[in-house]
């Protein structure tokens, strides 16, 4: 691994993404950056949510394979496509994002699910991105399938995305097709993985209310508001809680 690459990977591991970006961008601007360094920069830009920069660099990169940083890794269009799909989704270009994510997944299939190991742009991220895009397009069944694929491939060594978020989002997708039982189960799993996630407790309360379990709904909402006080105002205006509008406990919680 080159000195620049080694230093940049170290900065990413310490979560100094701004420092890694500055180091790698200098190499790009000087015309010295290798394909691996550009790919790591793409990963860093994605982490920093600089969507315009991701799209510009993705357009500049070509998929390739071969030795990178002293190791033989596959540096192909899958990682580029994942980053492109995430940036397109973040800028509400969801039809383009769906196409980019599906192309990335097809590339992963052709290469046995391998991407550059020094980036976090891996298979579970491809599928979870596709799930988010499909749900945004209200193609809930396709979103459910994508999230299930993401969870079946989840790499717990990765620091990209969060497993509980995928279960949370899967719950939203199940709600989209009216399967509240499955939505409830997915959201409970999200809470098992991350008990401090206020929005999971909020959605759990919504599903209980819609299913006609007021005691469980109030209990879950209490947990949510305890973690994020602003959720009280959100609950007041949420139609999912229509069945609790006259419940004194709900009124007290959301006042």
Image (tube, rainbow, N blue to C red):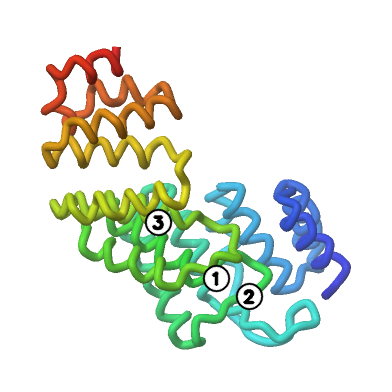
Which residue does the image show at 21% across and 63% down from the upper left? Answer: 141
Question: Can residue 101 be seen here?
Answer: no
* Residue density around tag 1, few if under 14, some if 14–19, many if 20 or more, within 10 Å: many
Q: Nearer the viewer, mark 3 or mark 2?
A: 3
Residue 132 sits above or below residue 218 on the image: below
Which of marks 1 and 3 precedes in the sequence?
A: 1
* Residue density around tag 2, few if under 14, some if 14–19, many if 20 or more, within 10 Å: many
Which of marks 2 and 3 precedes in the sequence?
A: 2
Q: Nearer the viewer, mark 3 or mark 1?
A: 3
Residues 156 and 36: in front is: 156
Contact? badges 2 and 1 (CB < 8 Å): yes
Q: Position of residue 101 (x, y in %)?
A: 40, 67
Residue topped by disc 3: 166
Q: Position of residue 206 (x, y in %)?
A: 23, 37
Residues 60 and 125: in front is: 125
Residue topped by disc 1: 79
């Amino acid at each position: 691994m080159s000195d620049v690459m080694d230093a940049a990977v170290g900065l990413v591991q310490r979560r100094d993404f701004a420092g890694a970006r500055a180091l790698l961008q200098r190499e790009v601007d000087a015309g010295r950056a290798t394909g691996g360094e550009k790919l790591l920069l793409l990963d860093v830009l994605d982490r920093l949510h600089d969507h315009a920069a991701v799209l510009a660099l993705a357009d500049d990169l070509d998929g390739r394979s071969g030795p990178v940083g002293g190791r033989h890794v596959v540096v192909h269009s899958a990682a580029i496509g994942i980053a492109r799909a995430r940036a397109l989704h973040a800028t509400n270009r969801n039809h383009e994002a769906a196409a980019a994510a599906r192309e990335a997944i097809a590339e992963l299939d052709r290469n046995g699910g391998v991407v550059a190991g020094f980036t976090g742009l891996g298979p579970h991220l491809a599928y979870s991105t596709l799930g988010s895009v499909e749900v945004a397009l209200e193609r809930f069944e396709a979103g459910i399938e994508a999230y299930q694929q993401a969870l079946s491939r989840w790499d717990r060594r990765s620091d990209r995305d969060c497993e509980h978020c995928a279960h949370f989002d899967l719950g939203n997708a199940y709600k989209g097709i009216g399967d509240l039982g499955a939505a409830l189960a997915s959201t409970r799993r999200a809470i098992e993985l991350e008990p401090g996630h206020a929005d999971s407790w909020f959605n759990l309360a919504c599903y209980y209310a819609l299913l006609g379990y007021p005691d469980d709904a109030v209990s879950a909402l209490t947990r949510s508001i305890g973690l994020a006080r602003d959720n009280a105002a959100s609950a007041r205006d949420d139609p999912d809680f229509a069945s609790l509008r006259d419940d004194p406990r709900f009124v007290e919680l959301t006042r």
